Amino acid sequence: MERGNFSLDTTFTTQDAAYRSAATQYGAAIERLARGYEADPDLARDLVQDIHAALWRSFAYFEGQCSVRSWVYRIGHNVGVSHIQASRRARPGALADLDELDALAASDDPEREVGEARAADRLMATIHRLKPADRQVMLLYLEDLTAGEIGEVTGLSAGAVATRISRLKALLAEAFQTEETDR
């Protein structure tokens, strides 16, 4: 090889480009997903980094058999599940808490904003009480994934996901109504 003439491994370049594109497009969703698995802000930031590292590595073998969106959520889901399993082993009987939703957009109506923040807190607390498998489906549903995409991520059939989402929505609505009548 002549001095100054070198070629980069095209797989590496493609892997970097694919990762950069996915990280740019889905970075905020990865952060929300991580906060859904981990309430502690420092641990959630670590989880975001772990997801990004796994995502970068994964593009070395991504073959395009599913959408990039499904791939990103699948990687995030798998890393999140591993994080929960490690957390449960470290603290038997404990589950990772869900963190608050993204900060609500600034509003000229602070009373409405506070009400929305409280509703978001109640929603996340209610979702936290779900079984881990149900929580994962609901978090992905809240990220606007279709039943088919959630199935690709979790390994469930699209029909099973749709049924689970319907059941979970009814359960969450009932929990919200129960909390309202208890006040």
Image: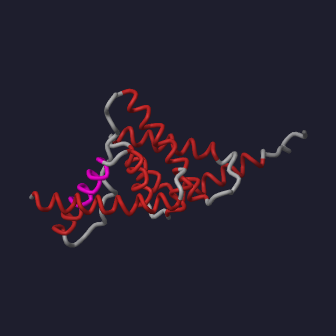
Q: Please state the extent of the stretch shown in magenta in the rendering.
A: 117-129
Residue occupying the far right of the picture: 2
Residue at 19%, 72% (x, y): give it: 109
Report the coloring of the rendering: secondary structure
Quarter of the image for the C terminus: give it. Answer: bottom left
The furthest residue to the bottom: 108
Q: Main secondary structure of the magenta part?
A: helix
Left or right of 159, for residue 17: right
In this image, 35 relative to 151: left or right? left
- Residue nearer the viewer, 13 or 44: 44
Q: Residue furthest left?
A: 183
| Residue closest to the eye, 108 or 94 | 94
Q: Position of residue 69 (x, y in %)?
A: 56, 59
Q: Is residue 163 above or below residue 51?
A: below
Instruction: Pinpoint residue 172: horizontal percent, then vertical percent.
Output: 28, 59
What percent of the width, then of the height, locates residue 42? 37, 39
Q: Position of residue 170 (x, y in %)?
A: 30, 63
Residue at point 65%, 54% (across, down):
18
Can you say which quadrant of the picture contains the N terminus?
Answer: top right
Q: Is residue 5 highlighted in magenta?
A: no
Question: Total number of numbered labels?
Answer: 0
Horizontally, is 131 left or right of 51 in the view? left
Q: Give the quarter of the image for residue 169.
A: bottom left
Q: Quadrant of residue 162?
A: bottom left
